[in-house]
Image (tube, rainbow, N blue to C red):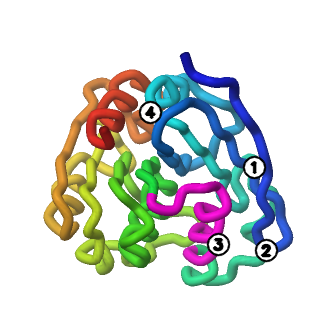
Amino acid sequence: MASELETFSVDLNGFSSRVWKKGEGPPLGFLAGFGGLPRWIPFLDVLACERTVIVPSLPGFPGGERGHTVLDSHLDWMLAVRRLLQQAGLDGADLAGSSVGASFAAEIAAIWPNVVRRLALIAPCAFWPLGNTRLEKRLPLIEAPTLLIWGAEDRIMPRRYADRFAAAIAGRTEITTIPGAGHLAELDKPDEVAAAILRWTA
């Protein structure tokens, strides 16, 4: 039985960022996709049955106030996300992310390889807030075993991008395609996506 949902805040450059925490077991971080998470979702409940799920809110997303207004560059964003993960208790933990959140998770694993144990990326892309950051140039720096999860019906990042990511990442990779899911596969097929992440990070 998963524990009750905890909510706390951490300070990030003078702005408050909400952090959700629920479950028992080893910590598993999740960085939300485009639009963020205005509320706790069923996908997170499935993860929390086996893991302590920690969900920090990125600056400018729901729960992240206007923290993005003081982040002027790619470096600013990376340092802010790194500090957010530290304050949320996710140093050395498994890290999952979706869409924009998956891109940030991949960047963290590339730049600070020691802070991520295993990585699960749901269709990474970085249209907001940074546009194209040339993440592909840093993929060979990712040493963490990486699961790439793709919705079979993703119209934003077609499935062929999964093969490009897998080929470039230095660590061991695996691709899981989720039938009937679009870009935010964790919303369309929460049980299937959560099961794939739990299997990969066991």
Name the residue type under label 3. Answer: Ala
Mark pair 4, 2: CA separation: 30 Å
Which residue type does callout 4 highlight?
Answer: Glu
Q: Residues within 10 Å of mark 4 (few under 14, many from 20)?
A: many
Q: Which residue is mark 2?
A: 13
Dot 1: element: strand
Query: Number of numbered discs present?
Result: 4
How many angstroms separate mark 2 from mark 1 (CA)? 14 Å
In the rendered image, which quarter is residue 124 located in?
bottom left
Magenta residues, as a range? Answer: 78-92
Under circle 4, the secondary element is: helix
Task: Measure the alpha-carbon separation of dots 2 and 3.
Answer: 8 Å
Mark 4 lies on residue = 186
Crowdedness near tag 1: few (<14), some (14–19) or many (≥20) residues, C-alpha within 10 Å: many
Of tags 4 and 1, which is closer to the observer? 1
Residues at circles 2 and 3 in contact by the CB criterion of under 8 Å: yes
Residue located at (34% from left, 38% from top): 197
Identified at 82% across, 59% down, the residue is: 16
First in residue order: circle 2 vs circle 1: 2
Residue furthest to the top: 1
Q: As drawn, is 76 to the left or to the right of 103?
A: right
Q: Would residue 76 appear left or right of 91 to someone viewing this image?
A: right
Which badge, 4 or 1, comes first in the chain's sequence? 1
Mark found first going from the N terminus, 4 or 3: 3
Measured in 3D between alpha carbons, the distance from the residue under mark 3 to the one under mark 1, in whole angstroms, is 14 Å
Q: Is most of the magenta stretch helix, strand or loop?
A: helix
Q: Given contact means CB atoms under 8 Å apart, are the residues at marks 4 and 3 in contact?
A: no
| Residue 52 horizontal/vertical position (percent) | 54, 37
Contact? badges 2 and 1 (CB < 8 Å): no
| Residue that numbered label 1 is attached to | 18
